[in-house]
Image: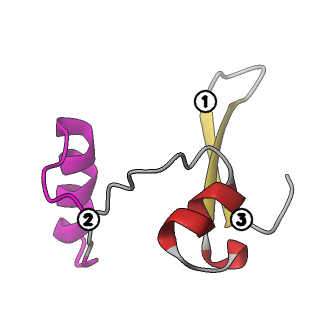
């Protein structure tokens, strides 16, 4: 685990902690482009990985964030 975080990571960490959600940031040295790679790097099961997907609506261009298990397909 690397303790140094970039500014965007720190902003997210600060916002979550402000909401009372404890956070530990881990920077993984290996590729984590897929849930399978992330699970291998974190030494856990694919279902324990959270995938984040962001889409924009066609009309309003509002972002939609989907958080799902690494084992799921969206």
Seen from the viewer's position, the closer of residues 32 and 10 is 32
Of the two numbered discs 2 and 1 in the rendering, the one whose residue sits closer to the viewer: 2
Q: In the rendered view, would you say 1 is above or below 47? A: above
Magenta segment boundaries in residue numbering: 1-22
Q: Earlier in the sequence, mark 1 or mark 3?
A: 1
- Residue 10 on image: x %, y %: 18, 49
Image spot of residue 58 (x, y percent) = 78, 21
Check the image and tell me how it is coloured: secondary structure
Q: Earlier in the sequence, mark 3 or mark 2?
A: 2
How far, Cα to Cα, is label 2 from label 1?
A: 34 Å
* Element carrying mark 2: loop
Q: Residue at x 61, y 30 (%)?
A: 62
Circles 1 and 3, Cβ within 8 Å, touching? The answer is no
Residue at 20% from the left image edge and 69% from the top image edge: 17
The picture places residue 6, in percent across and down from the top left corner, at 19, 39
Q: Secondary structure at mark 1?
A: loop
Residue with the mark numbered 1: 62
Name the residue beneath numbered marker 2: 1
- Where is residue 72 drawn, in percent x and y? 83, 65
The span from disc 3 to disc 2 (Cα, nearest Å) is 21 Å
- Residue at 28% across, 51% down: 12
As drawn, the label of residue 70 is 3
Return the mark for residue 52: none
């Amino acid at each position: 685990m690397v303790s140094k975080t970039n500014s965007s990571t720190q902003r997210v960490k600060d916002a979550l902690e402000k909401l009372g959600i404890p956070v530990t940031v881990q920077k993984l040295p290996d590729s984590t482009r897929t849930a399978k790679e992330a699970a291998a790097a974190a030494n856990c099961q694919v279902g324990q990985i959270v995938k984040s997907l962001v889409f924009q609506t066609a009309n309003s261009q509002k972002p939609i964030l989907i958080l799902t298990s690494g084992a799921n397909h969206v």
